[in-house]
């Protein structure tokens, strides 16, 4: 199981198109990928969860990744966040 | 794409994809959660297909970026938490629509209460998805709520769904299957809505809102046509409208033959929605109200009051013009689930129409009572279908008398109404004199009479060709019935397809029919043919064709007569022109 913190660095924060990209990325792996909100685990494979996390530019997202391909999933997500989801 | 064109007319319009509910296609209404889950899953799948196709189109036209919000919506339809909540609602006994509404409202509220203006606005995607899912779940609200002109595409439509299209918005109907109920097509025809059926692959290929050209005469359907194709079909449509306009004069003109015989021109209908088009096309009343549709739209036998409402409503809409109500003609190709009639080897020769009704007096009496009560609202008449023996007719008449007495006992003395019968079984045609003693009118159902006469199922393609209404056997049969009616002084009408066949109309007039009951769109043409008929000459033609041996001989003879007449008329016009120019 991996615990990672990723910073949202694009100007607009997580909006619909970004949420779609995160969700699609997570759906590519078999591992569970979850964020914690108010003590509840929310799967990032569900786009509405990603949206409702309400993460703005400069904020951190704490994730738990668990499963056979957790390392790959973690690397892909790191890259996606580092590239600011292809935005400014 | 090409299908079977069943109702003539050209439409060029945006398409409206209408997904029907299983409960509406004659299948049992989904009372168990499993069926409801399946229905919801299908709505999700359809919504995804629609969105994916829109995304493809936007990407092509406007680039990758623009499609972003719709790709997000596609992901919402894959969101397990979101779908899970809806499925939970269904599991708890909610219908799909209710479960979708509850869950979408919940999510929309989440968004609305965010501290982030952008996210607040995103509740709109949830509402969009809600609308798309509800649309995909079908529901009658969609057709009645139309606010733009469309061509409706569906896998199949029930008669009641077609009846709801009696508004200016539906310009055409495309059906993937079609023919599940021939009633739907009969209705579309009455409402003059062009219709093409049997379009396999139709629903999977459409996402809604494409422009479509359809031609109900040829069965051609073009999705996203070129400008050139649109222009070509607009020209074609204009030409057909000019042809129709030529017939319009006859709507006002009294249907009288050249030698002064007055012939009644009525229409066959199944719903009140058709009375408007009937009057607009020059119908002088209803020669046949099929009551099966009324029974089909209910989940159980409609009450006396419900039936009264329909019959009286139609009678009022006709404003004193005659309304012939045919009692329930169930069986054959018309199936009504709740009546529990078992499937038969030969349904057309089986337990149907009056045979069923006489065995179920409670059901029959309710209908008779409703018809008698509606007589206050206009010129209402009653007619029994599928009578084969005098005994059946007398039993049916006794039931009418019984209901009359019952109503009178309750203080509502009903008006005496004319009682008639369909002539559609050969035994009746042969014994017409005997039957004529016991009724006020005959209505000859040539469709069934033909198939029983030639022992050829009209829905069986391999033998349907035997059912030819030009055949001397049918002509002799009808002639015999008309002679018996005339001798007794009762009215006789024709209410089958043969009644609207232009070449045959003069023969029916020569035989002495008092009226023709036809489909609504053909009313103007039928009136024109009557006005151009010389009854005395038709009588001579009738004598000639009755001696012939085959349908082909009769058709050839009548066809050549028509050609000669047209030539004579053209020459006549030339002479008139020549005379006119000399003045």
Image (cartoon, coloured by chain):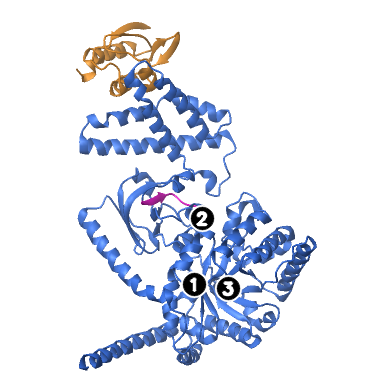
Residue B425 lies, in percent from the top left, at: 62, 74
Q: Start and end of the magenta stretch? A: B149-159
Q: Which mark is residue B159?
A: 2
Total numbered labels: 3
Q: Which mark is residue A81?
A: none
Residue at left offset 60%, top offset 86%: B483
The C terminus of chain B, quarter of image: bottom left
Q: Is residue B567 above or below residue B343?
A: below
N-terminal label among 1 and 2: 2
B583 displayed left or right of B324? left
Element type at mark 2: helix
Image quadrant assignment for residue B421: bottom right
Residue at left offset 39%, top offset 51%: B152
Residue B475 lies, in percent from the top left, at: 52, 83
Which numbered mark, 3 or 2, is in the foreground of this view? 2
Q: Which residue is mark 1?
A: B497
Element type at mark 1: helix
Judging from the image, mark 2 belongs to the subunit labelled B
Label 2 environment density (alpha carbons within 10 Å; few <14, some 14–19, many ≥20)? many
Q: Is residue B262 above or below residue A82?
A: below
Identify by letter the chain in blue.
Answer: B
* Residue B37 drawn in magenta: no
Q: Is residue B461 above or below residue A49?
A: below
Q: Is residue B549 visible?
A: yes
B72 displayed left or right of B181? left
Q: Which mark is residue B452?
A: 3
Marks 1, 2 in one chain = yes
Label 1 environment density (alpha carbons within 10 Å; few <14, some 14–19, many ≥20)? some
Identify by letter the chain in orange.
Answer: A
Q: Is residue B263 above or below residue B120?
A: below
C-beta proximity under 8 Å, tags 1 and 2: no
Which numbered mark, 1 or 2, is in the foreground of this view? 2
């Amino acid at each position: 199981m991996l615990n990672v913190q990723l910073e949202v660095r694009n100007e607009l924060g997580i909006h619909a198109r970004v949420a779609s990209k995160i969700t699609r990325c997570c759906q590519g792996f078999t591992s569970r990928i979850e964020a914690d909100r108010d003590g509840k685990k929310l799967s990032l494979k569900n786009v509405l969860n990603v949206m409702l996390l309400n993460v703005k530019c400069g904020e951190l997202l704490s994730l738990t990744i668990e499963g056979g391909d957790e390392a790959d999933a973690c690397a892909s997500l790191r890259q996606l966040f580092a590239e600011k989801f292809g935005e400014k | 794409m090409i299908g079977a064109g069943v109702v003539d007319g050209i439409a060029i319009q945006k398409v409206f994809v209408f997904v029907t509910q299983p409960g509406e296609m004659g299948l049992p209404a989904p009372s168990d959660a499993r069926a409801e889950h399946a229905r919801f899953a299908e709505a999700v799948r359809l919504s995804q297909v629609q969105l994916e196709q829109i995304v493809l189109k936007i990407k092509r036209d406007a680039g990758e970026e623009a499609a972003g919000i719709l790709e997000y919506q596609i992901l919402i339809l894959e969101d397990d938490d979101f779908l899970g909540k809806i499925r939970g609602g269904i599991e708890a006994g909610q219908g799909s629509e209710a479960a979708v509404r509850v869950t979408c409202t919940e999510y929309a509220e989440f968004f609305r209460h965010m501290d982030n203006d952008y996210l607040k606005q995103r509740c709109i995607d949830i509402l969009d998805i809600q609308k798309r899912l509800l649309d995909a779940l079908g529901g009658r609200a969609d057709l009645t709520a139309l606010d733009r002109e469309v061509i409706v595409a569906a896998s199949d439509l029930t008669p009641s769904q077609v009846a709801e299209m009696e508004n200016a918005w539906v310009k055409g109907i495309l059906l993937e299957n079609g023919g599940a109920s021939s009633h739907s097509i009969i209705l579309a025809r009455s409402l003059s809505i062009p219709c093409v059926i049997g379009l396999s692959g139709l629903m999977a290929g459409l996402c809604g809102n494409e422009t479509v050209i359809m031609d109900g005469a040829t069965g051609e359907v073009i999705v996203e046509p070129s400008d050139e194709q649109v222009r070509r079909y607009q020209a074609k449509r204009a030409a057909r409208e000019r042809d129709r306009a030529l017939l319009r004069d006859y709507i006002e003109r009294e249907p009288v033959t050249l030698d002064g015989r007055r012939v009644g021109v009525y229409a066959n209908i199944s719903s009140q929605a058709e009375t408007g088009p009937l009057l607009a096309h020059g119908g002088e009343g209803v020669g046949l109200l099929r009551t099966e549709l009324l029974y089909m739209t209910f989940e159980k036998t409609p009450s006396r009051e419900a039936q009264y409402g329909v019959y009286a409503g139609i009678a009022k809409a006709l404003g004193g013009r005659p309304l012939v109500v045919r009692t329930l003609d169930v069986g054959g190709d018309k199936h009504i689930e709740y009546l529990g009639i078992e499937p038969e080897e030969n349904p057309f020769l089986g337990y149907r129409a009056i045979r069923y009704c006489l065995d179920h007096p409670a059901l029959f009496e309710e209908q008779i009572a409703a018809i008698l009560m509606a007589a206050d609202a206009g010129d209402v008449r009653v007619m029994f279908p599928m009578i084969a023996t005098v005994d059946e007719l007398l039993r049916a008449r006794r039931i009418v008398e019984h209901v009359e007495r019952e109503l009178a006992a309750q203080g509502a003395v009903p008006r005496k109404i004319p009682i008639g019968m369909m002539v559609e079984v050969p035994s009746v045609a042969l014994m017409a004199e005997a039957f004529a003693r016991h009724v006020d009118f005959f209505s000859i159902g040539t469709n069934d009479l033909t198939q029983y006469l030639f022992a050829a199922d009209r829905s069986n393609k391999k033998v349907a060709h035997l059912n030819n209404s030009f055949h001397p056997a049918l002509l002799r049969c009808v002639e015999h019935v008309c002679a018996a009616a005339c001798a007794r002084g009762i009215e006789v009408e024709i209410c089958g397809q043969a009644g609207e066949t232009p070449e045959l109309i003069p023969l029916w007039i020569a035989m002495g029919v008092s009226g023709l009951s036809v489909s609504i769109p053909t009313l103007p043409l039928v009136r024109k043919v009557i006005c151009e008929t010389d009854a005395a000459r038709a009588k001579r033609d009738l004598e000639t064709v009755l001696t012939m041996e085959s349908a082909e001989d009769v058709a050839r003879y009548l066809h050549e007569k028509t050609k000669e007449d047209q030539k004579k008329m053209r020459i006549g016009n030339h002479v008139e022109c020549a005379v006119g120019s000399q003045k």
